[in-house]
Image: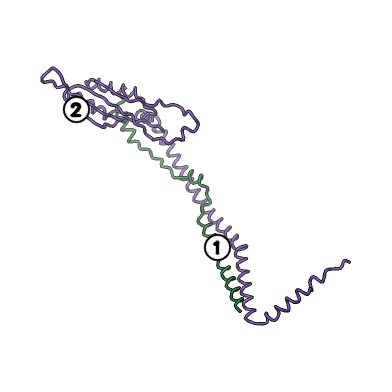
Chain colours: A green, B purple
């Protein structure tokens, strides 16, 4: 009788472990990006604005050459 | 026809095993627990070998679609930004040398000293002394890995200059220094009357410690 219970418990815990393992594997797949890191760097945002006021300020100054 | 090893299927060993199991399986509790155990094992096997790979593939593909859509959007934004940057760059291309004049690639100590001399001439002050420490001569890297060594984006050129002249001339020199295109910061200023034979001399001595910069990147 006890052997039955032990076997049943082993089966239940095995199933639980497998289900949890599957769950965490799926969570990991969801969280992992499919885009390679070099590509992520390539598409990083670029600011196209250049501070022209600095150039205007420099233009006003003298080179003294 | 060859004799089949029928004795294998009806061996004494299996018969005895079956004879031992058969009465046990007649008990309802035993039958229920055996069914449950095998059901759990079947669930585990299917979960690991069938459900997991399928679900993983589905989730991976969904994630890939989302990532690629986002990537496409980011690339379009980047292309737009690059086109804008190109247009801005073309607009200011003529004025880019100004940056090199303000922040040269190498110390340009001689040019800096000449600029200070010209400024002193324009201001009406005279330079008593000018001191520039030894500076590195920039060139190509001696070894292929030399450029990997960490360096500061800006290097300093410390300059000490001593001028003499009336107050107005020295003030004009200071104003000119502030308005000079080459970026220069004034670290210390010391003004004292110049020692001379005349009793009421209005000549002053101005000592300046300056720091100019050059870009290494």
* Residue at the (38%, 40%) spot, across then down: A49
Q: Is residue B69 above or below residue A6?
A: above
x then y, percent, for residue B22: 71, 79
Q: Is residue B26 left or right of residue B211?
A: right
Q: Is the same chain shared between marks 2 and 1? A: no
Q: At numbered mark 1, what does the secondary structure look like: helix, strand or loop?
A: helix
| Neighbourhood count class around disc 1 (C-alpha, 10 Å): few under 14, some 14–19, many 20 upward | some
Check contact, mark 2 vs mark 1: CB within 8 A.
no
x then y, percent, for residue B83: 45, 39
Of all chains, the one bearing label 1 is A
| Neighbourhood count class around disc 2 (C-alpha, 10 Å): few under 14, some 14–19, many 20 upward | some
Q: Is residue B211 left or right of residue B24?
A: left
Q: At numbered mark 2, what does the secondary structure look like: helix, strand or loop?
A: strand
Q: Quadrant of the C terminus of chain A?
A: top left
- Report the number of numbered marks: 2
Q: Which mark is residue A21?
A: 1
Tell which of B92 and B2 is nearer to you: B2
Q: Which mark is residue A51?
A: none
Question: Which residue position holds label 2?
Answer: B191
Of all chains, the one bearing label 2 is B
* Residue at the (17%, 22%) spot, across then down: B194
Tell which of B65 and B113 is nearer to you: B113
Q: Is residue B201 above or below residue A50?
A: above
Classify residue A10 by image quadrant.
Answer: bottom right
Tell which of A22 and A31 is nearer to you: A22
Q: Quadrant of the N terminus of chain A?
A: bottom right
């Amino acid at each position: 009788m006890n052997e039955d219970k032990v076997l049943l418990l082993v089966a239940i815990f095995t199933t639980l472990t497998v289900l949890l393992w599957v769950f965490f594997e799926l969570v990991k797949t969801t969280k992992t990006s499919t885009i390679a890191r070099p590509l992520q760097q390539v598409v990083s945002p670029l600011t196209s604005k250049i501070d022209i006021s600095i150039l205007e300020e420099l233009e006003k100054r003298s080179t003294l050459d | 026809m060859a004799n089949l090893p029928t004795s294998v299927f009806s061996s004494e060993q299996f018969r005895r095993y079956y004879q031992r199991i058969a009465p046990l399986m007649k008990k309802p509790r035993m039958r229920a627990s055996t069914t449950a155990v095998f059901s759990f094992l079947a669930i585990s096997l299917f979960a690991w070998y069938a459900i997991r790979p399928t679900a993983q593939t589905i989730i991976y593909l969904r994630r890939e679609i989302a990532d690629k859509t986002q990537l496409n959007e980011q690339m379009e934004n980047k292309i737009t930004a690059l086109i804008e940057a190109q247009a801005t760059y073309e607009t200011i291309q003529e004025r880019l040398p100004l940056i090199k004049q303000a922040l040269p690639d190498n110390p340009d100590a001689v040019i800096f000293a000449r600029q200070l001399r010209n400024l002193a001439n324009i201001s009406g002050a005279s330079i008593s002394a000018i001191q520039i420490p030894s500076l590195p001569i920039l060139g190509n890297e001696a070894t292929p890995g030399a450029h990997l060594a960490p360096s500061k984006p800006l290097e300093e050129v410390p300059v000490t200059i001593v001028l003499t002249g009336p107050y107005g001339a020295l003030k004009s020199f200071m104003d000119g220094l502030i308005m000079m295109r080459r970026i220069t910061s004034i670290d210390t200023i010391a003004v004292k009357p110049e020692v001379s034979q005349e009793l009421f001399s209005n000549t002053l001595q101005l000592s300046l410690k300056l720091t100019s910069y050059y870009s290494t990147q």
